[in-house]
């Protein structure tokens, strides 16, 4: 006979106490108790949601000036929350999105096409908004469009951040673009693609760029491969059917490493080598290489 424990954890006790104080109108007391519940891993996200929703003291939204709501289905947040090096997953997750915004802005300045002067941005493979929330703060929701193969992630970003969005597809050629965009930003998709779809996604995503616009994407390059002790094949490519995502088939979305030579060859054979206007090794997170293509 299996015995099921009915004991509550410290986090659960604090969460219940905080909810009770909120129902009594004691916002100060609730803020103090829920801040403690937020320090417990099993109630971290639930406590965070109550603090953010009620605008209590200690709210990240009050500090950062943007919507800090986090979906319980966010695999990237789950990665931070479960990683041994993360002492404060909330801060690490939110700061990571802000860092991405800074690095994207630097990259666009290098090609004289500033983000703040970009009329329309498509964030592709956008997930549950780790970066979207920061992009919205910079540009406003009306200039941001998101797309992801996980439809619930697109719905979350539309509801939470007020952006427009549409579902992607597992087959690149089945994606239907609602329009064309002056910037198509694809962060850490090509670092997960199998060989069978790598070039196809590059072709399809370039098609989403408006004339004169940019496609910016990142890859796991040589530094990342060396760090993870990965040996690339003769073409400069490696794929493993494993990733942080729990929502996408691992054969479709694993972990990919590519050499610069591999990426350059794929650009040349798909859209043409002359479309590359800038590249920067280990640019995003001091870990992923960045490539910038411009459509004439």
Image (cartoon, helix red, strand yellow):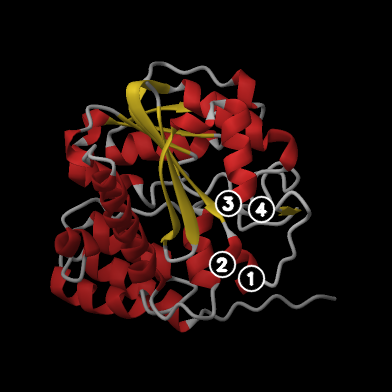
Q: Residues within 10 Å of mark 1 (few under 14, many from 20)?
A: few
Residue 223: image tag:
2
Q: Residue at x 76, y 45 (%)?
A: 251
Label 3's element?
helix
Q: CA distance from mark 3 to mark 2?
A: 11 Å
Q: CA distance from mark 3 to mark 1?
A: 14 Å
Label 1's element?
helix
Relative image position of residue 91 (x, y in whole percent):
33, 70
Q: Residues within 10 Å of mark 4 (few under 14, many from 20)?
A: many
Q: Is disc 2 in contact with disc 1, using a CB cutoff of under 8 Å?
A: yes
- The image quarter containing residue 10 is bottom left
- The C terminus lies in quadrant: top left
Label 2's element?
helix
Q: Is disc 3 in contact with disc 2, using a CB cutoff of under 8 Å?
A: no
Among numbered discs 3 and 2, the one appearing first in the sequence: 2
Q: Is disc 4 in contact with disc 3, using a CB cutoff of under 8 Å?
A: no
- The image quarter containing residue 170 is top right
Q: Residues within 10 Å of mark 3 (few under 14, many from 20)?
A: some
Among numbered discs 3 and 1, the one appearing first in the sequence: 1
Disc 4 vs disc 3: which is toward the camera?
3
Relative image position of residue 234 (x, y in whole percent):
78, 53
Q: CA distance from mark 1 to mark 4?
A: 13 Å
Q: Is residue 125 left or right of residue 49?
A: right
- For label 4, the residue is 256
- The relative height of residue 184 versus residue 91 in the rendered view (above or below) is above
Among numbered discs 1 and 4, the one appearing first in the sequence: 1
Q: Residues within 10 Å of mark 2 (few under 14, many from 20)?
A: some
Q: Residue at x 61, y 58 (%)?
A: 244
Disc 1 vs disc 4: which is toward the camera?
1
Q: Is residue 31 left or right of residue 81?
A: left
């Amino acid at each position: 006979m299996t015995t099921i424990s009915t004991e509550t954890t410290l986090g659960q006790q604090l969460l219940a106490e905080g909810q009770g104080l909120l129902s009594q109108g004691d916002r100060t007391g609730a803020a103090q108790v829920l801040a403690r519940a937020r320090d417990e891993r099993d109630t971290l996200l639930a406590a965070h949601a109550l603090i953010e929703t009620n605008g209590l003291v200690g709210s990240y939204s009050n500090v950062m000036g943007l919507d800090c709501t986090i979906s319980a289905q966010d695999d990237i947040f789950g990665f931070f929350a479960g990683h041994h090096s993360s002492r404060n997953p909330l801060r690490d997750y939110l700061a990571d999105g802000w860092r991405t915004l800074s690095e994207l802005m630097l990259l666009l300045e290098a090609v004289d096409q500033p983000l703040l002067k970009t009329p329309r941005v498509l964030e592709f493979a956008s997930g549950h908004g780790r970066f979207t929330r920061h992009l919205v703060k910079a540009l406003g929701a009306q200039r941001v469009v998101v797309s992801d193969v996980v439809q619930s992630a697109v719905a979350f970003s539309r509801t939470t951040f007020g952006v427009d969005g549409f579902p992607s597809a597992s087959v690149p050629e089945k994606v239907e673009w609602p329009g064309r965009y002056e910037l198509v930003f694809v962060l850490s998709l090509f670092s997960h693609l199998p060989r069978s779809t790598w070039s196809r996604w590059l072709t399809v995503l370039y098609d989403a760029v408006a004339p004169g616009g940019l496609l910016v994407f990142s890859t796991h390059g040589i530094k990342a491969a060396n760090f993870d002790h990965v040996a690339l094949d003769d073409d400069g490519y490696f794929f493993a059917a494993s990733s942080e995502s729990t929502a996408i088939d691992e054969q479709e979305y694993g972990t990919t490493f590519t050499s610069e030579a591999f990426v350059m060859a794929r650009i040349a054979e798909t859209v043409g080598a002359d479309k590359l206007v800038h590249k920067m090794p280990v640019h995003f997170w001091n870990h992923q290489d960045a490539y910038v293509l411009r459509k004439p």
